Image (cartoon, rainbow, N blue to C red):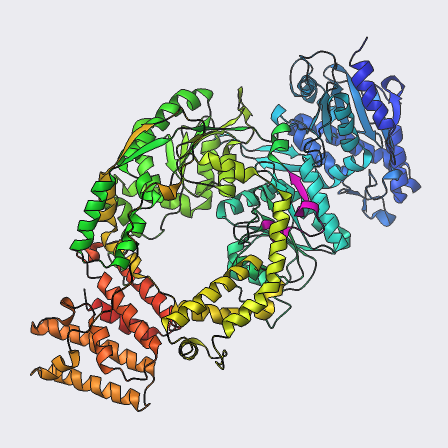
Amino acid sequence: MFSEHSVTENGVIERLKGLNGASWSYYHGENLPKLAQDIFIEEWLKNALCSLNPDIAKQPDFADEVIYKLRGVVLEARHTGLVKANENFQEWLMAEKTLPFGENGDHITINLIDFDNIENNHFVVAQQVHYIAATEVFFDIVLYVNGIPLVVGEVKTATRPSVTWQDGAADFIGGTKHYWKNAEPFFVPNLLCFASEGRTFAYGAINAGPKDWGPWHTTQQEEEQLTGMASVLASVEGLLNPQTLLQILESFALFSTLKTGKKTPPKRIKLLPRYPQFEAAKQIVERVKSGYPKKGLIWHFQGSGKSLLMLYAARMLRADNHLKNPTVLVVVDRRDLDSQINETFGGADVKNLVKVQSCKKLGEHIEQDSRGILITTIFKFQDVEIDESNSKGLNDRDKIIVLVDEAHRTQEGSLGDKMRWALPNAHFYGLTGTPISSIERNTFKLFGADEDPGRYMNRYSYKQSIRDGATVPVKFEPRLAELRVDRASIDKEFERLAEEHGLDNDEKTALSTRAGKLAVMLKAPKRMEAISDDIVQHFTSHVKPKKLKGMVVVYDRDACVQMYYLLGQKLGFDAVEVVMNVDQAPIKAKGGGKDGKENRDWRKWNKELESPLTEEDFQRWQEIDGDDQLQKDLIESYKDPESPLQLLIVTAKLLTGFDAPICYCMYLDKPLRDHTLLQAMCRTNRLYEANGVRKGMGLIIDYLGVFENLRTALAYNPDEIEGVVEGIERFKEMLPEQLKKCLAFFPGVDRSLEGFEGIIAAQECLPTNEKRDEFAAAFGVLSKLWSAINPDPFLAPYRNDYKWLAQIYESVRPVGQTGALVWAALGPETIKMVHENTDINRIRNDIDELVMDEHAIFTLTEKEQEKRALRLEIDLMGRLRGSGNPEFVALGERLEKLRQQYEAGVIKAIDWLKGLLDTAKETVELEKQTGERTVTEEDNVQALTKLFMETRPDRTPKVIQDVVEQIDKIVKATRFDGWQNSASGPREIQKALMLTLVQFGLGKDKELFNKAYEYIKGHY
């Protein structure tokens, strides 16, 4: 007859006995040299103490003292609890304890296990081990190392379909046997427990619930998965071989403090690695020790524990004597990820941990060669200035290892560039659940080593994660909210608005493009009302009865405010909360020259959106955003099943790095795609089991049909990735030639000239629009090549020329800053008009598949027409000279003198422009004071342009004319009625003006900026 004894138990033991290398000797329980009450096999333990500790070998009685101390740790469990006692015993196992057994009573380290030479240890697998404590038990399998029981296994019959590994695990966790309680002393030295029924295999740490037990495979087993007893024996061989067990004990068995709720005390837990974490952390350490290649990509699906993987790798790197005290830099790219990593590392009591607080501190730590584990965000590299002449960066030591979490979003740009320049010889390892493979942004190129097949060092797919029970499946349920748009009415109203305010084609295009965006449609009040009703109905009928919680993801922060009040009125305001970025300025400033200035977010949401926003709500959101601890407390409340908080409303924050297993349902009303979509949906894929509630899957309610993007987000084609990366290598061959082509537009120009003078010299080589267009097209190709290759040391010799060309390109392309100003003036009115003509038909829940292309929904834009030439209608100089007013005469004389000085070379073009600005400002003021017809009211050109056209000498650089025209265009945009009441008014003008001046290399000229701004203010 088949039984657990004959099939599973004997199969496991035979495999352990037959391992190559260090293997297990076999004893039946009744033949072990111990009594039923004994935990240790003291004969073997005493032999190990003598063989591993020369001072004890000289005085064998010392071994009895050590065993006496170990028995004391076992007895502590009655008072401290099993986990704390286990943690204390692990300190002995890890040789962290000393006793005065040396010469003259010196303290010596006590070694219980030899981790360096494992053949020096005594490994025994025992069957049916008898133990008596609060109750009498027979453990199926016990693994002893040097007489210490490190592993206990329970097996069940393989022939009954209703029995699973969980029945074996249940013997430890509870029920009538409840080993961890009834045989508690035996588990004080325990490393791990395992269970099997002959078909599957799982292991867990002491006091772990069923969801925290996991399988042991290899990441290579993605498609071809062994089944039945073959799978069990492969797991046994992989996990329970002596080398793996001692590696787990030495480097991976951790203890951490887990918050269980706002009102409940934190709980101490034991952490063991899952096999992908074990594999990848070891690979990182081995690659760093070998010295090449100095990078690698770890591609592990969202929710599979990348934070813990980094913790394991960082500890192993720091503990390795061969690496001589390395620096480990853990880099994240969002504050909430930063918080999650800090909690993971801090909760595990990691030594030599530094949380970098500022850009300045990061620079100091790097330059001062700080050792230890540094945790920082990528944004703290923003103050680093790249010096191409300094190949050593800030620190060129090669024992700096950089671990980058979610390695895709900011690593491809200038921040990643700065980090790599600062640490030229560092090792870079990227960890992501969602790598990107495109020409412009490519995680595989950035972190993937050529030597790694597929350009990843270790991969753990979403299929493996779900199969292993590391995450739960996620179901997408499309409930498309159908829009009804009265396009004819919108077009008619828009034309009226444009005509009323005299918009030219450029301004109409800018306004209609912004008004026609999907955002305006999604936030239409009738639509938001319908979506909120649907969320309430679904949540109360499908989510709340399961005693689980949800998230609502909306388009932007404005929508967060709208949705908060809609849901709060229906579910109660204690059930909902918003987590988003909020302007931290006071609602109304007092003193400091800003008296009475309103907070921009407050003004927008309270006045422009006309929401029922209260000061209390606004200030609470500010505090949640600005105070990390307050945000953590809020999240802990959300995780607490007893808390009334049921729904979090977000738009960007908490879509990454947010781990709340109780989150079951996400209501998605924001267009997401690719890696962003995957990261968001994985907020619902965490395991959850508490108080009789078990989450079987996550749920996404999809109001926009974005789930169609999942196929591309989850697709992985190695050939395609290789093609992209190989294409990038070809781009390296093309870039120098394209750079030469761009530089050929500027023969003889001194590229060392900076700022304004350099731009004037370069622009003289582009005298016509045709020539400018040719250069812009050539530089566009160069820019794409550069983006595809960057960051890469290959670019270093070309960087200065590229930066120079980029500056010239910025100076010749149309600025288009007036779009923001037109929007500031007319945006609210336009939005209101769109909202009044946008309704919702119904919310459909009968859809299998739907593609919603945001670009095809609706557009307001006309075709952009060529700008007609503006003709000068008024001779401003003649007007000034013809006036009898002495003040006008004086202004005319001043203009004449300015022109003469410039023509004679006494003043530079820039000084002439400053003088022109002053005169234009005074002209406007004087016309207002005298009541004479203001020049600028009926003309197509503004005062400054008129003055310029009349007074400019023939050899005036084209760039000066460009500056003048652009400044006047900004002025024109400010002249709309009601502009002064816009929340973003002065800020938008100053921003547009500064960008204009920067474009022409004049950004650092504060005097010019102030004069230009004063001139603009004259038109209010």
Question: Closest to the observer: 84 or 227?
Answer: 227
**Relative to 203, residue 623 above or below:** below
User: Observer-nearest residue: 22 or 352?
Assistant: 22
Instruction: State which region is magenta.
Output: 443-460
| Residue found at x 67% / y 45% | 454
Tell me if I can see residue 381 in this picture: no
The residue depicted at 49 percent of the width and 48 percent of the height is: 335
Residue 820 against residue 650 in the figure, above or below: below
Quarter occupied by the N terminus: top right
Along the line of sight, the residue nearer the viewer: 1020 or 362: 1020
Q: Position of residue 765 (x, y in %)?
A: 42, 78
Vertical arrangement, residue 773 with respect to residue 337, above or below: below
Residue 18 quadrant: top right
Q: How many marks?
A: 0
In the orientation shown, which residue stands out farthest toward the right? 58
Q: Quadrant of the C terminus?
A: bottom left
Residue 903 image offset from top left, x and y in percent: 29, 89
Residue 471, located in which quarter of the rendered image?
A: top right
Identity of the residue furthest to the top in this view: 1
- Residue extending farthest bottom: 904
Image location of residue 663, percent across then percent down:
48, 30
Q: Quadrant of the rendered structure where residue 137 is?
A: top right
Q: Is residue 454 covered in magenta?
A: yes
Q: Quick one: 744 or 671, which is closer to the camera?
A: 744
Camera sees residue 799: yes
Look at the picture and state if 946 lies above or below 73.
below
